[in-house]
């Protein structure tokens, strides 16, 4: 039997409900970060939140701060980029448990609790270093092994991680301000027009755009051909005429 291709069926539904615990291996560091934040005292976040009554339910502060910690560990310092990753990256989706915050929610959380996200990030980094991890995300911890003691080396290492956390959080604030100025508040900047993503009109729009591009290329090629011929003809005419005149 001739070899073919494996089927790519994106419309195939799951036969069983997906289990997020199967999306990543047990040893993936995101599970450690989720559990670490879950065991920390996050009451300061909950004290500012009102539950009950009418209206839509809010996002769990523990989830949002875990998203920020995981983002900071990967040097992601844009609320818009965090929103995108919450929709496309498996680890972020696991943290969110499919409750996907938009960038306005992430930015508002950072503003509502200034300094706290970086403090939790620093605590998680210190914890991971004490557990013997060499890296969390893109943050190298190899040179910051922190013993469970009050030694000067341990204090210096912890201070270094706190300084790094503050720098990352400051970069988040700066990135949000710059992108708000560029795109406007509440706008991601990468929105696809509805007529371009709607399945009912998407294929037609893509075909029309491709046809337009091809027509432009064909016109450019035709113009280049005519231009080259015209230039050559223009130069040859006078020269030929001059030569003929001299012969006569």
Image (cartoon, rainbow, N blue to C red):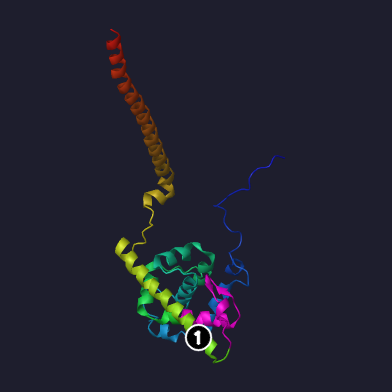
Q: Nearer the viewer, residue 159 or 14?
A: 159
Task: Specify whether residue 60 is in view.
Answer: no
**x and y percentages locating residue 99 in the rendered image:** 47, 69
Q: Which residues are magenta?
A: 120-147
Q: Nearer the viewer, residue 108 or 129?
A: 129
Please name the residue shown 41% across and 51% down the image.
Answer: 197
Please name the residue shown 31% across and 23% down the image.
Answer: 235
Query: Does the magenta-highlighted stretch encompass residue 140?
Result: yes
**x and y percentages locating residue 89 in the rendered image:** 51, 64
Q: Nearer the viewer, residue 145 or 13?
A: 145
**x and y percentages locating residue 236 in the rendered image:** 33, 20
**Residue under numbered circle 1:** 156
Please name the residue shown 36% across and 34% down the image.
Answer: 220
Number of numbered callouts drawn: 1
Q: Is residue 65 above or below residue 238?
A: below
Where disc 1 sits, the SS reads helix
Residue 207: quadrant of the picture: top left
State which quarter of the image contains the N terminus. top right
Q: Is residue 71 above or below residue 226?
A: below
**x and y percentages locating residue 76 in the rendered image:** 45, 68
Please name the residue shown 61% across and 62% down the image.
Answer: 16
């Amino acid at each position: 039997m001739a070899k073919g291709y494996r089927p790519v069926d994106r419309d195939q539904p799951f036969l069983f409900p997906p289990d997020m615990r199967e999306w990543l291996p047990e040893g993936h560091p995101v599970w450690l970060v989720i559990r670490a934040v879950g065991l920390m005292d996050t009451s300061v976040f909950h004290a500012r939140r009102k539950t009950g009554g009418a209206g839509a339910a809010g996002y769990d502060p523990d989830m949002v701060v875990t998203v920020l910690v995981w983002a900071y560990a990967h040097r992601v310092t844009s609320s818009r980029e965090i929103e995108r990753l919450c929709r496309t990256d498996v680890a972020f989706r696991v943290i969110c448990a499919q409750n996907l915050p938009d960038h306005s929610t992430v930015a508002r959380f950072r503003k509502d609790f200034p300094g706290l996200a970086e403090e939790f990030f620093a605590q998680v980094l210190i914890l991971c270093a004490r557990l013997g991890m060499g890296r969390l995300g893109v943050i190298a911890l190899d040179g910051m092994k922190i013993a469970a003691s009050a030694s000067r080396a341990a204090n210096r290492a912890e201070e270094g991680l706190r300084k790094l956390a503050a720098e990352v959080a400051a970069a988040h604030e700066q990135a949000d301000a710059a992108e708000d100025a560029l795109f406007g508040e509440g706008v991601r900047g990468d929105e696809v027009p509805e007529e371009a993503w709607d399945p009912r009109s998407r294929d037609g729009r893509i075909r029309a755009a491709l046809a337009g591009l091809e027509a432009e290329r064909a016109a450019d090629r035709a113009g280049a051909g005519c231009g080259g011929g015209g230039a050559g003809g223009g130069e040859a005419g006078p020269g030929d005429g001059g030569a003929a005149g001299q012969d006569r």
